[in-house]
Image (tube, helix red, strand yellow):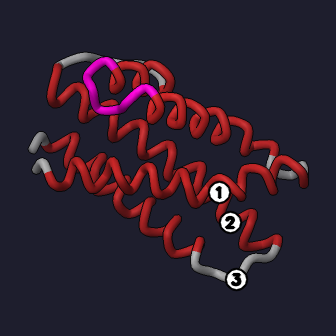
Amino acid sequence: MDLIFKKKFEKFQKALLTLEEILDKEKNVIIRDATIQRFEYTVETFWKMLKEYIYFLDKKETKSPRSTIIEAKYLDFFTEEETEFALEMIQDRNLSVHAYEEKLAKQIMEKIPKYKDFMKKFFDKIQKNQ
């Protein structure tokens, strides 16, 4: 395993664990806000790890979360449906900076468990292939 990829993978693993941990907490406004914050940095580490994985396997460089997701689809890491879901996740991550808007915060919060499951599925897939 490439050293840069290994570091990105480990960083993502730690972020994912913190997201899983907070999702088990009893919900209130403080936990919601903390969950959204953890979601933000978990998605950030996810796409950067994915970017490095693509480069490690195929020597293709991507520059943004969106281009990374699209490239992952072309390399058959994601199905069409998974690609759309991942792009939605990136969009929600970008919108999460507006989590002070109650309605938006609630909408994003409802989706986070599914996003966590999606990222965990990909994490498990990579870990299995190591």
Mark 2 vs mark 3, CA separation in Å: 12 Å
Q: Could you tell me which secondary element the residue under label 2 belongs to?
A: helix
The question of residue 4 being in magenta is answered with no
**Pointers 2 and 3 in contact (CB under 8 A)?**
no
User: Which quadrant, please, contains the N terminus?
Assistant: top left
Mark 3 vs mark 1, CA separation in Å: 16 Å
Residue corresponding to mark 1: 37
Residue 21 percent location from the top left of the image:
51, 75
Residue 55 percent location from the top left of the image:
22, 25
State the predominant SS element of the stretch in magenta: loop
- Residue type at mark 1? Gln
**Pointers 1 and 2 in contact (CB under 8 A)?**
yes
2 or 3: mark nearer the eye: 3
Question: Residue 25 sits in which quadrant?
Answer: bottom right
Residue corresponding to mark 3: 26
Q: Could you tell me which secondary element the residue under label 1 belongs to?
A: helix
Name the residue rendered at 34%, 59% in the picture.
13
Sequence-wise, the earlier of marks 3 and 1 is 3
Name the residue rendered at 43%, 26% in the picture.
80
Would residue 11 appear left or right of 64 to someone viewing this image?
left
Q: Which residues are magenta?
A: 74-80
- Residue type at mark 2? Ala
Q: Residue furthest bottom?
A: 26
- Residue type at mark 3? Glu
Residue corresponding to mark 2: 34
Q: Which mark is residue 83?
A: none
